[in-house]
């Protein structure tokens, strides 16, 4: 999709003109269809002397915010793609302030996973050319916002398109290949892949245990970006990428097990974030670390009762092979801390069903060691609509996962499951400032939303980028 800002004089003919309307807002000189009242995300075609137009409702306007415009823009693209339209012009006049989020909404609204559908069920068209109409003097600043929005939207869609691919397409080696191609497309990203032998020799006992039962061996993907001063400590982003989670020997019930293809979304989010950071040329140092493994069951699989030794020498008693995310993350967090010496770590993981019990699918669980980080992420969550809510992981939760035979056990039972999982991870982070996001409830959606079709949401990409940009 190509987005460009244009002034009225240079707008192209033949594209559908999209205009936003508050509820009841009059529209001088032109006739709107009678049934259109400006309700949020309602849409109606109408004709003007300049050609075909599409009216999109913003709702009552009492609280017009970023999400109002993201939704409206997403709705416009979806309506046009259903109607077979490929070129649109969006009237930005009066909404220039929201240019970035409108661009994000356009990009995200345009994504639809139809790769494997028969032709008659694929999207009728893809909107390919988008012009954003602005009043001339404001153009350069607005063009910059649109450019940033395009990069962010593309990064989110990159994460979603990886996420929607199932386990027979995306397994650890395939995810590593995708990361390597990202490094070719963005030379500022230096991608390194640690293969199974290296992991075995290097002491990544968590990753090799979890990946042991699969025909597809595990990989640790490392993506380096140096946009800041040489030698300056990086920000470390760690993302759980279980390409499919069967539960292992502690196998999951069959119902909805297919959704566990999304158990890689933390890692996919980290890849999307790295892509955007490179495209935006941010002046910071960042390292992305993605422990990728498939949690399967066979004679090589790790078992309940096993004791595994992680990268930093700490031991884990495995009580449930379905609590595998924390086991691979232990290795990746230790590796991040010891090898990369970051100034802080942020991790993304579809870690627990318990966080869905706690927060539903509306907000991700936020676990952090510092109140400033909590404030930063909550603010970014409100701005992007990728909302987070703080949860604890302090002393009693740590005690709950004490093991009699190893440093820690990998489950503390059902009670406070999201919190004991975070308490587990914290032991591999040490004293570093840290944010853990449990995105189990938010990484994909089973309902179509205005700018989020069913499937992977890319949750975390916009959230983290917002903390860097704001
Ligand atoms: N990937 C799951 C968590 C999950 C569940 C994500 C539902 C998204 C939707 C994770 O590996 C898991 O199985 N966690 C267990 C932990 C338990 C065995 C301590 C869980 O939440 O049930
Ligand atoms: Mn699991
Ligand atoms: Zn899992």
Image: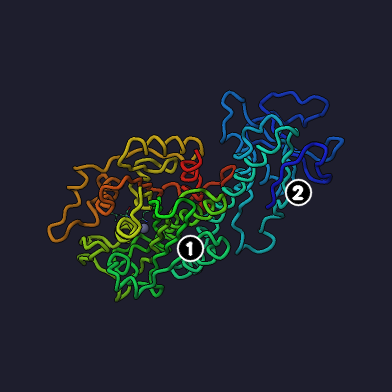
Q: From the viewer's perspective, is residue 373 above or below residue 153?
A: above
| Residue 392 rendering spot, x and y as whole percentages | 28, 40
Q: Label 1 neighbourhood size at 10 Å, few (<14), some (14-19), many (20+)? A: some
Q: Is residue 326 visible?
A: no
Classify residue 83 as left or right of residue 334. Answer: right
Q: Nearer the viewer, residue 462 or 413?
A: 462
Q: Is mark 1 within 8 Å of ligand 3?
A: no
Q: How many angstroms separate mark 2 from mark 1 (CA)?
A: 36 Å
User: Is the residue 415 above or below the residue 378 in the image?
Assistant: below
Q: Residues within 10 Å of mark 2 (few under 14, many from 20)?
A: many
Query: Residue at horizontal 35%, vertical 69%?
Result: 211
- Residue 44 in sight from this viewpoint: yes
Location of residue 179 with respect to 337 vertically, above or below: below
Q: Please state if 431 lies on the left or on the right of 231 as rendered.
A: left
**What SS does tag 2 mark?**
strand
Which residue, given by chain and number where applicable, does mark 2 sit on?
Answer: 87
Q: Earlier in the sequence, mark 2 or mark 1?
A: 2
Q: Is residue 125 left or right of residue 394?
A: right
Identify the residue position indicated by label 1 in the image: 190
Chosen colour scheme = rainbow
Find ligand 1 in the image and state its quadrant: bottom left
Tell which residue pokes out farthest to the left in this image: 404
Residue at image coords 39%, 75%: 215
Residue 8 at x, y percent in the picture? 80, 36
Is disc 2 in contact with disc 1, using a CB cutoff of under 8 Å?
A: no
Question: Which circle, 2 or 1, is nearer the viewer?
Answer: 1
Residue at (66, 33) in percent of width and height: 96
Callout 1 secondary element: strand
């Amino acid at each position: 999709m190509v987005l460009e800002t244009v002034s009225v004089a240079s707008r192209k003919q033949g594209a559908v003109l999209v205009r936003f309307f508050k509820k009841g807002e009059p529209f001088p000189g032109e006739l709107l269809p009678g049934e259109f009242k400006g309700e949020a995300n309602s849409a109606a075609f109408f004709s003007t002397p300049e050609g075909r137009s599409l009216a999109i409702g913003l709702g009552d306007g009492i609280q017009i915010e970023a999400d109002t415009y993201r939704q409206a823009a997403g709705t416009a693209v979806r309506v046009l793609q259903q109607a077979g339209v490929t070129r649109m012009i969006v009237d930005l006049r009066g909404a220039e302030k929201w240019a970035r989020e409108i661009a994000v909404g356009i990009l995200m609204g345009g994504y639809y996973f139809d790769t494997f559908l028969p032709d008659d069920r694929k999207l009728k068209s893809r909107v390919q050319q988008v012009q954003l109409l602005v009043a001339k003097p404001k153009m350069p600043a607005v063009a910059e916002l649109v450019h940033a929005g395009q990069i962010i939207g593309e990064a989110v869609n990159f994460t979603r398109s990886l996420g929607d691919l199932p386990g027979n397409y995306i397994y650890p080696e395939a995810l590593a290949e995708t990361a390597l191609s990202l490094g070719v497309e963005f030379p500022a990203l230096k991608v390194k892949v640690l293969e199974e032998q290296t992991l075995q020799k290097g002491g990544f006992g968590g990753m090799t245990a979890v990946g042991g039962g699969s025909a597809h061996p595990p990989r640790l993907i490392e993506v380096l970006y140096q946009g800041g001063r040489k030698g300056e400590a990086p920000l470390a982003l760690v993302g759980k990428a279980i390409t499919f989670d069967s539960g292992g020997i502690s196998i999951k019930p069959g119902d909805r097990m297919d959704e566990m293809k999304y158990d890689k979304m933390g890692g996919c989010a980290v890849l999307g974030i790295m892509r955007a950071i490179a495209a935006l040329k941010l002046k910071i140092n960042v390292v992305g670390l993605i422990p990728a493994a498939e949690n399967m069951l066979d004679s090589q699989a790790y078992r309940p009762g096993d004791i595994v030794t992680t990268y930093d020498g700490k031991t884990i008693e495995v009580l449930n092979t379905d609590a595998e995310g924390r086991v691979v993350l232990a290795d990746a967090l230790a590796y991040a801390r010891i090898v990369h010496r970051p100034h802080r770590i942020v991790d993304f993981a579809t870690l627990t069903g318990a966080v869905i019990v706690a927060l539903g699918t509306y907000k991700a669980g936020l676990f952090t060691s510092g109140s400033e980080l909590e404030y930063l992420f909550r603010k970014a969550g409100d701005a992007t609509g990728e909302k987070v809510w703080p949860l604890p992981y302090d002393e009693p939760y740590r005690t709950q996962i004490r093991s009699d035979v190893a440093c820690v056990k990998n489950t503390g039972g059902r009670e406070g499951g999201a919190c004991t999982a975070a308490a587990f991870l914290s032991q591999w982070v040490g004293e570093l400032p840290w944010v853990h996001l449990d995105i189990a409830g938010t990484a994909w959606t089973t309902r179509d939303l205005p700018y989020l079709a069913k499937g992977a949401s890319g949750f975390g990409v916009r959230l983290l980028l917002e903390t860097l940009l704001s």
